Amino acid sequence: MTRFERPRSVAEAASLLAAGDWALLAGGTDLYPAHVGRPIARPLLDLSRVEGLRGIRRSDSGWTIGATTTWSDVVRAELPPLFDALKAAAREVGGVQIQNAGTVAGNLCNASPAADGTPVLLALGARVVLQSARGERELALDEFVLGSRRTARAADELVVAVRIPARSARARSAFAKLGGRRYLTISISTVAVVVDVDTNGAIVEAGVAVGSCSAVAQRLPALEARLVGVAAGADLAAMLDPADLAPLTPIDDLRGSAAYRRDATATLVRRALREVASS
Ligand SMILES: Cc1cc2nc3c(=O)[nH]c(=O)nc-3n(C[C@H](O)[C@H](O)[C@H](O)COP(=O)(O)OP(=O)(O)OC[C@H]3O[C@@H](n4cnc5c(N)ncnc54)[C@H](O)[C@@H]3O)c2cc1C
């Protein structure tokens, strides 16, 4: 490691980024394990002390999750049922030590196909806010994560926040994860379901997304469309058609075969749908 800087403001971080080729560091729970046994070649820009980047704020247009908000912050935050899926995912990111250090933005920026935050934030319709000395821009999450370990972040940009659009107080969500064991495991499949509901109890908006079954987490648009207009308390699990999983491209690996992943995902989708129907 040649140089280490710990800026105190977004402006300072952006100006350092404009002038050099930095590796960005938040909680380090992805970055450090990726360098076991070899030094980090690039200078390190530690974002953990940048003021104003940590915490979850509510405004009329929705919620803003600051980039250095940790998974433990998410677990502890007072949030409406819309965020139950994000809280459930947060409780399953590694163990408590990992949740104390690991950040929501780090999970997205690392762009692992098995990142637990990505399907939940996709289902929530999240947008990623990027800042550089050139200015700010905002991308839908599916425009930000482009592939395995690949994002649309330019070298001089940092992610400053993730924005979640406002929903009604009746909106709710559920998360289901399958791993080789209960904790500290890389996901075989993850499913997030988000629904917003009108005053008559009918679903007005649905988000369903699956992680670990393609290079990038995928939404299931056919299922989402079919859920709209249905009573939220109905037998939603029965609405899954196996053809809804068409956007997924699971692989065979040591954690599971493609066929097993597809089968398990159908079970997880039904489980998550049952949970939102009963909440
Ligand atoms: C034992 C263990 C268990 C784990 N279990 C899980 C799990 O169950 N589920 C899961 O999803 N993940 C898991 N992880 C991975 C990791 O903890 C999460 O992905 C975490 O959210 C990463 O956040 P971080 O702040 O530590 O990222 P870092 O390691 O600091 O950074 C990760 C990447 O994102 C970049 N980055 C970070 N912040 C920014 C920013 N603001 N702007 C631009 N780029 C940025 C960094 O440059 C780096 O490339 C586990 C890790 C370990 C070590």
Image (spheres, grey):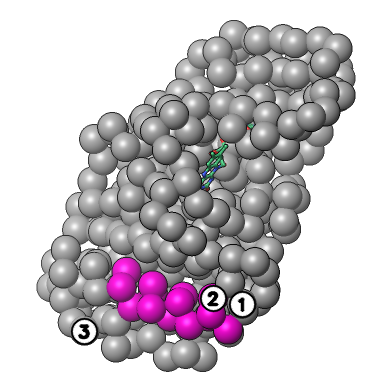
Q: Residue drawn at (24%, 35%), measured in percent from left and top?
A: 78
Amino acid type for the residue under numbered disc 1: Ser
Q: Which residue is mark 2?
A: 261
Q: Which mark is residue 257?
A: 1
Is there any visible trace of residue 74 in the rendered image?
yes
Q: Quadrant of residue 216?
A: bottom right
Q: What whole-number distance in Å separates the C-alpha atoms at marks 3 and 1?
A: 29 Å
Helix or strand or loop: what does disc 1 sit on? Answer: loop
Counting other residues with Cα less than 10 Å from the Cα at mark 1, is it few (<14), some (14-19), or many (20 or more)?
some
User: Can you say whether 159 is above or below 25 in the image?
Assistant: below
Mark 2, mark 1: which one is toward the viewer?
A: 1
Q: Which residue is mark 3?
A: 235
Marked residue nearer the N-terminal end (3 or 2) = 3
Q: Residue drawn at (65%, 41%), measured in percent from left and top?
A: 109
Q: Are marks 2 and 1 in contact (CB under 8 Å)?
A: yes
Q: What whole-number distance in Å separates the C-alpha atoms at marks 3 and 2?
A: 23 Å
Image coordinates of residue 93 in percent, x first then y, are: 45, 44
Image coordinates of residue 111 in percent, x first then y, are: 66, 49
Image coordinates of residue 118 in percent, x first then y, are: 53, 53
Counting other residues with Cα less than 10 Å from the Cα at mark 3, is it few (<14), some (14-19), or many (20 or more)?
some
Mark 3, mark 2: which one is toward the viewer?
A: 2
Amino acid type for the residue under numbered disc 2: Arg
Helix or strand or loop: what does disc 2 sit on? Answer: helix
Q: Residue drawn at (39%, 54%), measured in percent from left and top?
A: 182
Q: What whole-number distance in Å separates the C-alpha atoms at marks 2 and 1?
A: 6 Å
Residues in magenta?
Answer: 259-272
